[in-house]
Image (spheres, coloured by chain):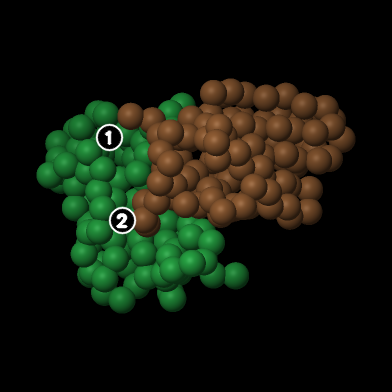
Chain colours: A brown, B green
């Protein structure tokens, strides 16, 4: 039962362009959504989050959009940089339980 | 900057052996978690721990698994009789009281378990 889905396992983007990572969820009880970034051989690190009462949150080059009616979350990275190459996990929270997607591997091509 | 630390970074064990993975969460955090990621698969929730007891656990967290906070700093995951399918990267995480804050999890770097 996968409550959080990332349907694109990988994405390649040219440096300087926009990267858009998508995430869909099924549980309407989720009240917080987060994106984590993971480099090989490291644990995931927190990137940006959004409350379910908002539809957008921006932090520098990173913007998260939430469409509750569509149960869809996206992360925009503009402009993309080679150092952004990593696996990105979206996560959704209800209570104190976090549900993670399967991840999208982003490659930013110099 | 405070961080979650995990030991060992990699453990190789024979099937049927007991394994203990150790974690030192961030000192003022109240919620503790174990997750695992089988190679090429999603990060899976195992268990959450609050106020010295398990608050939630997944179907994966069966009787072969146990968690303990033996002192004020360590948080351990014990796998009693390891199976081949337990081979994975195990991540410990901690967070502050959920309240109305970001609910951000801080992850350790992971402990890779290889069961032969």
Residue B52 in view: yes
- Which residue is at 58% across, 23% downward? A8
Q: Residue B77: x and y, percent?
A: 26, 53
Quarter of the image containing the N terminus of chain A? top left
Percent position of residue B20, x then y: 25, 52
Residue B4 higher or lower than B80, as above or below: below
For residue A88, say whether it is visible: no
Location of residue B79 in the rendering, given as x and y in whole percent from the top left corner: 20, 46
Residue A73 picture quarter: top right
- Please give the residue where the numbered disc 1 appears in the rendered image: B86
Residue A19's place in the image compared with A44, above or below, is: above
| Residue A29 percent coordinates (x, y) | 40, 46
Along the line of sight, which residue is nearer the eye, A76 or B66?
A76
On the picture, is B86 further left or further right than A37?
left
Disc nearest the viewer among 1 and 2: 2
Judging depth in this view, the residue of B83 and B50 nearest the camera is B50
Q: Residues within 10 Å of mark 2 (few under 14, many from 20)?
A: many
Reading the image, the residue beneath label 2 is B48
Residue B75 drawn above or below residue A53: below
**Both on one chain, marks 1 and 2?**
yes
Within 10 angstroms of label 1, few (less than 14), some, or many (20 or more) residues? some
Residue A53 appears left or right of A16: left
List the single residue furthest toward the right.
Answer: A16
Picture quarter with the C terminus of chain A? top right
- Give the residue displayed 60% in from the left and 70% down from the top: B1
> Left or right of B39: which side holds B74?
left
Q: Residue at x 51, y 59 (%)?
A: B104
Task: In the displayed orientation, state which residue is furthest to the front.
Answer: A69
Q: How many marks?
A: 2
Q: Secondary structure at mark 2?
A: strand
């Amino acid at each position: 039962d996968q409550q959080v889905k990332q349907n694109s396992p990988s994405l390649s983007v040219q440096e300087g362009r926009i990267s858009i990572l998508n995430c869909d969820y099924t549980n309407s009880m989720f009240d917080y959504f987060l994106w984590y970034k993971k480099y090989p051989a490291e644990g995931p690190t927190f990137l940006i989050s959004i409350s379910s009462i908002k539809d957008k949150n921006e932090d520098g080059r990173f913007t998260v959009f939430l469409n509750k009616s569509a149960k869809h979350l996206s992360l925009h990275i503009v402009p993309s940089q080679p150092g952004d190459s990593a696996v990105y996990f979206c996560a959704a929270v209800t209570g104190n339980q976090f549900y993670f997607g399967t991840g999208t591997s982003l490659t930013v091509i110099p | 900057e405070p961080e979650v630390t995990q030991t060992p970074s990699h453990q190789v064990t024979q099937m049927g052996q007991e394994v203990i993975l150790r974690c030192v969460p961030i000192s003022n955090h109240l919620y503790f978690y174990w997750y695992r990621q089988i190679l090429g698969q999603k990060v899976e929730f195992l268990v959450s721990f609050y106020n010295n007891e398990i608050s939630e656990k997944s179907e994966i967290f069966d009787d072969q698994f146990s968690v303990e906070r033996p002192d004020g700093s360590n948080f351990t995951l014990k796998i009693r009789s390891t199976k081949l399918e337990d081979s994975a990267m195990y991540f410990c995480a901690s967070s502050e009281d959920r309240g109305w804050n970001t609910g951000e999890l801080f992850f350790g770097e992971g402990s890779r378990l290889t069961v032969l």
